[in-house]
Amino acid sequence: MKKIEAIVKPFKLDEVKNALSKLGVQGMTVSEVRGFGRQKGHTEVYRGAEYTIDFVPKSKIELIVIDELVTQVIETIERAAKTGKIGDGKIFVFPVEEVIRIRTGERGRDAI
Amino acid sequence: MQFDLGITRNGLREIKTRMARGAPSHRAPKEFLRQYSDLVDGLVRKAFWKAQSELPAPSVCLMAVGGYGRGELALYSDIDLLLLYSSSQKEDLPPLIEKTLYPLWDLGFDVSCSSRSVDECLAMAQSDLYIKTGLIDGRYLDGEYEFFRTFYDLFTKRILHRNVRDFAAALRRDLQQRHQKYENPEYVLEPNVKEARGGLRDFQVGRWVIRARHKTDRWDSILFPDQSRALDRSLEFLWTVRNELHLLSGRRQDDLTFELQEKIAPLLEFPSGPQGIEEMMRQYHLSTQRLSSFAEGVLDRALSEPGRMKRFLSVFKRKRIDPHFAAAHGEIHLLDPVTFKRDPAQLMKLFEYCQTYQARIDYRMEEAILEALPFIDDRFQTSQAVNQAFLSILRKGDEVDGILKKMHELGFLSRYIPEYAEIEGRVHYDLYHVHPVDVHSLLAVEELIKLREGAYQEKIPLLSSLIKEMENPEILLLTTLLHDIGKGLEGDHSIVGAERVGKIADRMSLSAEEKEMMMFLVNRHLFMIETASRRDLHDEGTILHFAREVGSLARLKMLYLLSFADIKAVGPEAWTAWKDSLLMELFLKTSHFFEKGEMRSSLLKEEEMMRGLAKSLPPEVFSRYAEDLPARYLSCYAIEQITHHLEMARSIETEQVLVEWESTDGIHASVTVCTKDRYGLFARIAGSMFLNRLNILEAQIHTWGNGIALDTFQVEDKTEEMERRLQQFKSDLNNLLSGKVALKTLLTQRKQGNGLQPKVIPKVAGEVTINNRDSDFYTIVELSGEDRLGILYEITQALTDSGSDIHFARISTLGNRIVDVFYVQDTWGEKIEGKEKVEHLKRSLLGHLASREETT
């Protein structure tokens, strides 16, 4: 099992979510995050005053998938989130030791 | 069993269920509570007798206190007992209490019993608020009646009817603390029927104070009949809900959770599904609003009643404002009690004075307003004086949130704006919308007032300064108050709401522009946050589309402020730094379009063009391409030309490049090139023209949203071989684009004289500016320099070599001077930024502008 974490542009979230659901992904966690990488924040000017957007808003998607699905899920996110411009985001993959569904106590693949 | 009361635990459960089914727990919830309380009385007495019969019997009195004392016992509520004794027989009490309680515990009752002497009890009631309130509802159950009578007489005389003001103050403190605890969003969505604002406990607070002050249990005696009837219905509704909560969960469950909301709504005969739940919760919120304002009203009276002397003096100290009102001690006084009935318009005047004199409305004034409510009719609603006064309150801004809340609480607001009644108490059955719509709307106004007062200066500086530069803040506040007015009606709430707001604006005699502004804002109040969070803000098309829909900077500012207020009022967690950044970026980029002024004309032109194109093109062609035509492109050509370009665009699906030309005099020609855009395209076209000795006088290159490049050129050939050269140009370009040959090869092959006579002309100095200010999406490269054959090729090649992608260009020649403007981005679609990159590009371009000066 792997945990896949993707940071994408906010307006790409729906596309990524839909693409993943089509793939049969059952659940995911989504959060609003801010940060910077190559795409730095910037300063805008309005009526002479400067307003800084120092962290760029992004959306973070986290999901746990069985090993057989990992490649497909990554490709799907890549395809859906890509604009080809700077700031398209990143995908991280982590190994997962155990998954437990609290309500039933199920473990491993059954708990995903 | 030793302590048998003649019933088992299961037996009791059965009786409870039977009672609940058989008894009118819905229609007469209080009757149900009474019946259950009677049942418990019987069991408690039985247990007490048994205990007494088995033990040395001290003379004591058994009392029921708290809710049980009132005879309002919910199925799983605590049962509080009190044993009063005379001071001598203390040691015999514990076994008696144990023996009384054990069988009751065995039956599953949550029963507790304290034992106190009469003196102890009085002392404790003096010092402990909860003991005191519990005793107010104390009731004799069994034992020495004389004890009870003595105690209760002393209690009422010495404690309850004394220091009523302090009692009210203590209750208010307690109530505020309790509310604070239940104010967080989870509790608003899943309210506690007993403890939350407007819950059953609030009603008791009101009752206790009335009891203490007026020595009566008739709480309705201080209310108008309509009011007390409405209050009674609210109370019954809350009890009904609480009974169901206990019945369904089988324990003391006072939180109206989502799960239980779903179960209870159909039991109370609300329609099935979310709609029914929303209706039930609406009734719930309306009920708690009523109970809360009852409790607060009673407390206000108890606390604000001035001494007789003070009242007498204030008659002399007060200052007359006009024939109807006077001000004194931070309060407004009505000089003639029948003023409102004679001239209801004075009601609005009153609120205006409250604002001007920073006065509060005391309970006497509230009563006068309540009495006058029936006189608010359509004449009032359309009265010039009334509406002007209302708008003036909004315009001034001070305390507006408080004033509107008061208007709402008194039912004045929904009389004045009847549409408002429809959103009162209305809820969304979801986790995001914490507050009912009416409360949400008032909170949104409050957020704007806070913003205006500088509460968010540090965190949200841009919005804080925008609200201060508003020219007509009253329209913003009014719109914010009404932005969700379409909720709960059939259809899209934004559209329905806009229509309603239009009617309200007419009624208030607002100007056509104001009305239009309000309708626009209500109709599109979600547009900005949707665009900010779901569209690519780095795409010029997004910003253009947004700007076109919004239409003006004034509207943009209003929409930005309304979006802020709307989101912030949803709940404490709804406004995040994330949304803040996105909205700010969208605002700034859009405002740049409006401020530069280029927007207006090109937008107007674009709309006109679109209408023209829609008429002259077949619908399927129009719908396929219309979205992709950039504003800048549309502003450069006539309709016939665009129609022709679209024909060319359709045929390049089969051919890789189309070149067309038209020449009038054999020396000049206009050339149109249509192909799929690719990196370095312009340099290759310019290079091919250079190869064929075609001098470019003017050029416009455009890239459409669908990746089609449409470029037009004005070229010159002084050798009068135009036709041949253009044919050759076309075939060279074809070969270049298909990759058959490289531009460099062609250029070295034909390195001969260019056929133009060198002339002696004044030199022009080269100049390059690289501007990152004027566009949020492109770096604008402007250059001027001496014209010569091939210069455009060199410049575009230099731009391409430096990694710039040309999106738009305008080339012109003035005498022997070229003036070129390029809109470029880097290969990632970003502007060319960074000092080093900019300097490098500038040097390279300047080099080309100067490089041939010596050789010509």
Image (cartoon, helix red, strand yellow):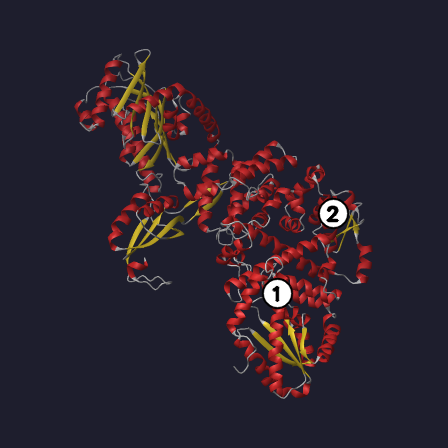
Q: Is residue B703 left or right of residue B387?
A: left
Residue B33: which numbered mark, if any? 1
Give the chain of mark 2: B
Amino acid type for the residue under numbered disc 1 = Leu
Residue in front for this viewpoint, B40 or B503: B40
Q: Which quadrant holds residue B748? A: top left
Q: How many labels were placed on the picture?
A: 2
Q: At x 80% / y 57%, what residue is drawn? A: B314
Left or right? Give the position of B20 relative to B361: left
Image coordinates of residue B434 in percent, x first then y, are: 52, 53
- Where is residue B216? Give x, y as percent: 74, 65
* Mark 1 Cα-neighbour bin, 10 Å: few <14, some 14–19, many ≥20: many
Report the chain holding disc 1.
B
> Do the residues at discs 2 and 1 belong to one chain?
yes
- Residue bearing mark 2: B372
Q: Which mark is residue A83?
A: none
Residue drawn at x 61%, y 36% is B503
Does label 2 or label 1 sit earlier along the sequence? Answer: 1
- Classify mark 1: helix, strand or loop: helix
Question: Is B588 situated above or below B818?
Answer: below
Q: CA distance from mark 2 to mark 1?
A: 37 Å
Secondary structure category for the residue under label 2: helix
- In this image, B752 relative to B408: left or right? left
List the single residue furthest toward the top.
B665
